[in-house]
Image (cartoon, rainbow, N blue to C red):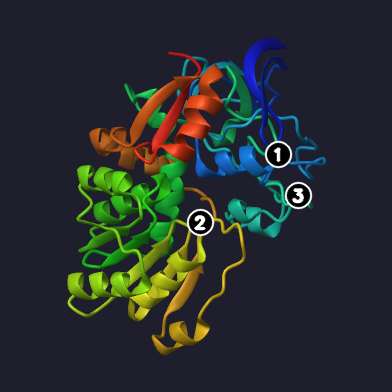
């Protein structure tokens, strides 16, 4: 048992900073000295509304709030369980924060992100930080299979980006973005920016990113995204897409914003036979214009989380370290989580990925 500093979420707008006991790792676990934990849009909703937070015992972890939040984290292994053979004390790792049973048909087929038992009856998410203790503490225990070894000299701040980049990479790969494709991303938050970068790395021809925030579009431009646009109506979006693609429309449109206008615009932007892929979690159920989609022979896909992709994403980030590093806009201390982290992301659109530093 080890006493650590931790952020603890009790419910909406109720995060407290406490000392918590972290037990020794189970036989199939490793204990990680957390270096950095990124703040995600889902963390903001968890804090503001309690969204996805376990309010009753989770079916797999049997845990509920109060819990330690945080699911985008990296660190150094400080202890290993008796059954762990492939990792050693001192190894630097990125954590895949999935919670899965490993026994249901989906898990056995490799789609553990669709685990039949991962979502609680209260809609609690199957992720560390929502239904089990996460990375906003000095130490955290995780399943060894979900601790992914980082290359030599791989910066641990970039290690905290592996999780959100995996969300984007899973969506791009599932959508089969190919060299020469024209792509639209609705929303220039961190997931939207990462989706644009992965699409470009995958060989997309025109990559268009649409957002209402000039600050976010400026960052997209700095990252080399070809067409950052501010289309404030369906008409202006249609005009921009028509101009850029020479009246063709896009092959794939990603909704990374999760509001009705972005989904409607994504469908309208498609060329015949195109695909809309929804990555964002909608707070309110959207209306899908099936007629418009049907007339284009279009497809509507969803991409939830990731599976079997972390090691590939680590290689992608390793190849493009300086590019992904520029998405990190601020590093803060644990006690600044709310004021300089969550609230800053809500108010300051110049911020993209804010990391909480737990250990240097």
Mark 2 neighbour density, 10 Å: few (under 14) some (14–19) many (20 or more): many
Q: Earlier in the sequence, mark 2 or mark 3?
A: 3
Tag 3 and tag 1, C-beta contact below 8 Å: yes
Task: Answer whether residue 116 is visible to the viewer in this image.
Answer: yes
Query: Would you name the residue on which mark 2 appears?
Result: 280
Query: Would you name the residue on which mark 3 appears?
Result: 120
Tag 2 and tag 3, C-beta contact below 8 Å: no
Query: Would you name the residue on which mark 1 appears?
Result: 131
Could you tell me which secondary element the residue under label 3 belongs to?
Answer: loop
Q: Earlier in the sequence, mark 3 or mark 1?
A: 3
Could you tell me which secondary element the residue under label 2 belongs to?
Answer: loop
Q: Residue at x 61, y 51 (%)?
A: 112
Q: Residue at x 48, y 39 (%)?
A: 346
- The reply, left or right, for residue 148 in relation to residue 63 is left
Between 329 and 303, the one lying in front of the other is 329
- The relative height of residue 89 versus residue 166 in the rendered view (above or below) is above
Q: Give the alpha-carbon distance from disc 3 to disc 1, as whole Å.
A: 8 Å
Q: Quadrant of residue 47?
A: top right
Q: Give the alpha-carbon distance from disc 1 to disc 2, as whole Å.
A: 20 Å
């Amino acid at each position: 048992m080890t006493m650590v500093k931790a952020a603890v979420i009790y419910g909406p707008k109720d995060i407290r900073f406490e000392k918590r006991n972290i037990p020794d790792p189970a036989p199939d676990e490793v204990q990680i000295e957390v270096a950095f934990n990124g703040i995600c849009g889902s963390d903001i909703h968890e804090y503001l509304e309690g969204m996805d937070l376990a309010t009753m015992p989770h079916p797999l972890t049997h845990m509920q709030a109060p819990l330690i939040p945080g699911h985008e984290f990296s660190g150094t292994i400080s202890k290993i369980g008796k059954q762990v053979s492939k990792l050693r004390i001192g190894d630097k790792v990125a954590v895949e924060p999935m919670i899965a049973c490993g026994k249901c048909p989906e898990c056995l087929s490799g789609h553990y992100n669709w685990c039949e038992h991962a979502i609680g009856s209260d809609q609690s998410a199957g992720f560390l930080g929502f239904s089990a203790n996460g990375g906003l503490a000095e130490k955290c225990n995780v399943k060894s299979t979900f601790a992914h070894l980082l290359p030599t000299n791989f910066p641990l701040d970039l290690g905290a980006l592996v999780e959100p980049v995996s969300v984007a990479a899973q969506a791009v790969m599932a959508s089969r973005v190919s060299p020469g494709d024209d792509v639209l991303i609705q929303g220039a938050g961190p997931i939207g920016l990462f989706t644009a970068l992965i699409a470009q790395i995958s060989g997309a021809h025109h990559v268009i990113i649409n957002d209402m925030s000039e600050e976010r579009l400026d960052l997209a431009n700095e990252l080399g995204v070809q067409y950052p646009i501010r289309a404030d109506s369906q008409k202006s979006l249609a005009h921009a897409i028509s101009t850029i693609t020479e009246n063709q429309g896009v092959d794939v449109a990603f909704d990374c914003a999760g509001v009705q206008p972005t989904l409607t615009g994504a469908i309208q932007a498609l060329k015949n036979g195109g695909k809309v892929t929804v990555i964002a979690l909608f707070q309110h159920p959207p209306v899908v214009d099936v007629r418009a989609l049907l007339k284009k022979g279009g497809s509507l896909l969803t991409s939830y989380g990731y599976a079997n992709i972390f090691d590939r994403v680590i290689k992608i980030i390793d190849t493009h370290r300086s590019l992904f590093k520029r998405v990190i806009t601020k590093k803060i201390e644990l006690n600044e989580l709310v004021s300089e982290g969550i609230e800053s992301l809500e108010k300051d659109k110049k911020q993209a990925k804010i990391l909480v530093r737990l250990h240097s």
